Amino acid sequence: MKILIIRRDNIGDLLCTTPLMVGIKEQLKVNRLDVVTNAYVAPVLKGNAFIDTLYVYHKLKHGHTSFFKVIYERLKLIFNLRQHHYDYILAFDQRALNLTRYLRKNKVFTPIQDWTNQTEVERAWELGQRLGLRGMPGSLALPLYYSSSNKKNVKTIGVHISARRVRQQYPIVKWVKLIRALHDLDAKLTFHIFWSPGDNQNPMHPGDDEKANTLKNALKNYPVQFISTPTLESLMEGLQGCGSMIMSDGGAMHIAAALNRPIVALFGDSNPKRWRPWGVPYTIMQSKTEDVKDIEPSKIIEGWFHLINLISTHKRSI
């Protein structure tokens, strides 16, 4: 049996599909499992032995390429994929479905669209159930970095300040208040602050250098390490040193979940039932206004201590 998965969208979406990939390879008699994704998110799949061939292409909106190079890459991708007669293709969006028209295949499956009360991991897993998968999906897979659990410092809190969606962006003044208050409550705590570097006016990849500089000035007397993350690899490597995370819903949150870090997840107008962290202890914070700016630092602190106490209680009971 030959299976192709086309998942061409975002970091979190792709990571939420990794339990499906593992399940297919472990449970089904698959001769070949190939995956198509874009160059920006592809690093999260590096080192995954359950993928036979990873096909990577560039999106024009991500920059670092030209229109003609994009066209050439797409034609080459189609040519390479046509060398295989796939028994099943799992296409996760309309453009993925469009690509299947040019490929040799037997059946094409698409995920359920009206999906609000279960997670994206389970939505992807349901496609595998149509192929014969049984049981529940496992953890998110990030094999090159997952073994890093021994590197983490339980007293180090990771704080990720970047978020693409406006209603997911927590105000800098509240980040300052939150970090100061946490340190006042426990002087042994240290903080690693992560952000996407660059100018916030950059149309391709808006960054948060200005916000990071504001934080540096406001927290210069606190035990804070600032870690710029220009690449996904630098983000994944940086998160390894954290014992827990406080961050908005987004791709970085799913990376933290794949690294088995406990998470206080701040949700704005995205659906926590669908996008919550998978496979790790977590606390969801969401205001009635569905805007993270309306979540008070005191509530986040309560959520963090509740999360850490739950973990400590669980460890003592084992």
Image: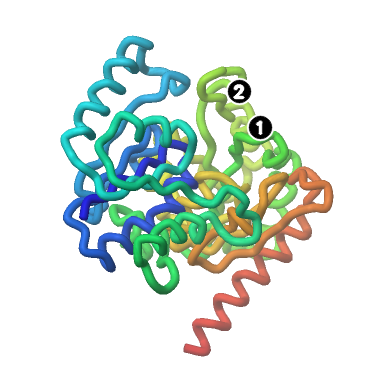
Identify residue type, mark 1: Thr
Mark drawn on residue 200: 2
At horizontal 37% and vertical 33% (from top left) the residue drawn is 38
The answer to whether the residues at label 1 and label 2 have Cβ atoms under 8 Å apart is no
Tag shown at residue 148: none
- Judging depth in this view, the residue of 70 and 185 nearest the camera is 70
In this view of the protein, can residue 207 be seen by the observer?
A: yes
Residue under label 1, please give it: 214
For the residue pair 206 and 68, the one nearer the viewer reads as: 68
> Residue 9: x and y, percent?
46, 37
In the image, residue 275 above or below residue 62: below
Q: For the residue marked with disc 2, what is the amino acid? A: Asn
Give the mark, 1 or 2, whose residue is nearer the N terminus: 2
Given this view, does label 1 or label 2 mark the residue nearer the observer? 2
Residue for point 56% across, 27% down: 207
Q: How far apart in space, not on screen, are marks 1 and 2 (Cα)?
A: 14 Å
Q: Which quadrant of the figure contains the N terminus?
A: bottom left
The percent coordinates of residue 203 (x first, y second) are: 56, 18
Q: Is residue 24 left or right of residue 305?
A: left
Whether residue 234 is visible, yes or no, is no
Which residue is located at x 52 percent, y 42 percent? 194
On screen, residue 192 versus residue 48, left or right, reads: right
- Residue at image point 30% right, 43% down: 35
Instruction: Point out residue 60 in the picture as x, y percentages from the top left corner.
Output: 42, 19
